[in-house]
Amino acid sequence: MEPVYTPVIGVARALFAFQGLKITMTGTEHVPRHGGAVLAINHTGYFDFTYAGLVGVEVGRYVRFMAKKSIWSNPVAGPLMRGMRHIPVDRAAGQGSFDAARQALRAGELVGVFPEATISRSFELKGFKSGTVRLAQEAGVPVLPTTIWGSQRIWTKGQPRRMGRHGIPLLITVGPPIVVAPEENAVRATARVRDAMQAQLHADQERYPTWPAAERHLLPVRLGGTAPTVEEAEEMDRADRRRRAGG
């Protein structure tokens, strides 16, 4: 039991119950009961870290997430992030956060990473950063491919939050551990992790309940939705980066 993380989990579970969220978790037998592992998680909604954290809770463990440093400046979220021992990521100076995550893994922690770095507006997998497999390599721990499907229906980029009672189904799947050998090429290993997650995500999508017609804007074009295409989503991300840079 942890003085901050444990009550936060209780609040989250109460909120999920109030919302009538229908969570189905599969593959938690792959999560080690002891020792470190990197959870590689796809990213389609703002609450993905909360849902992925349930994977640890299910087996009596806590997940330490790597998240953007700016959250630590928030007067409410900041103390919670510190209390739950999450890991701040400074994109301008990433080595410090990488070192902190590697240390946590070597100490036997579960560390949650979003290899896409940002939410996918197309709801397809974006390109993966190689840091996930490099962490696993250097810490000597496996990668756990973790997919979430349905979270964009609750809150995602450019859409209002749905915090009331809605009964939205949510699928969370953990695949078999992927071991990255110390000598393996990080780019090829990253492609291997992404391929496993893509197959897993497609399987999740196939077994997901019928998608509401009114929410086709939250469904990939490949599945008959009207979300931005991968190319359109990439251009939107580039425009965001230009705005942040003042260009």
Image (cartoon, rainbow, N blue to C red):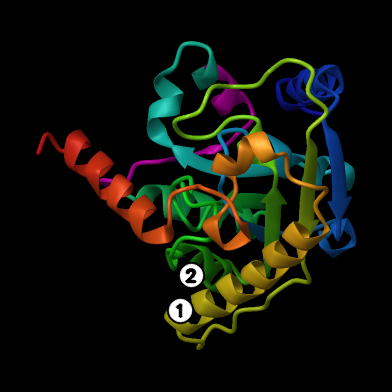
Number of marks in the image? 2
Is residue 92 visible to the viewer in this orientation of the structure?
Answer: yes
Outermost residue to the left: 247
Q: Quadrant of the N terminus?
A: top right
Q: Is residue 97 magenta?
A: no
The one nearer the camera, 184 or 102, is: 184
- In the displayed structure, does residue 86 sit left or right of residue 142? left
Q: Which mark is residue 134?
A: 2
Is 110 left or right of 120, judged from the image as shown?
right
Report how far apart the C-alphas of labels 2 and 1 lie in the structure. 6 Å
Does the stretch in magenta take in 84? yes
Q: Residue furthest front?
A: 213
- Quarter occupied by the C terminus: top left
Q: Amino acid at mark 2?
A: Arg
Outermost residue, bottom side: 183
* Callout 1: SS: helix
Residue 66 is marked as: none
Residue type beneath disc 1? Ala
Residue 51, quarter of the rendered image: top right
Image-quadrant location for residue 192: bottom right
Mark 2 touches mark 1? (CB < 8 Å): yes
Q: Where residue 128 sits: x, y (%)?
A: 46, 64
Give percent across and percent down for residue 234: 34, 55
The magenta-colored residue range is: 79-93
Residue assigned mark 1:
186
Q: Is residue 59 above or below residue 143?
A: above
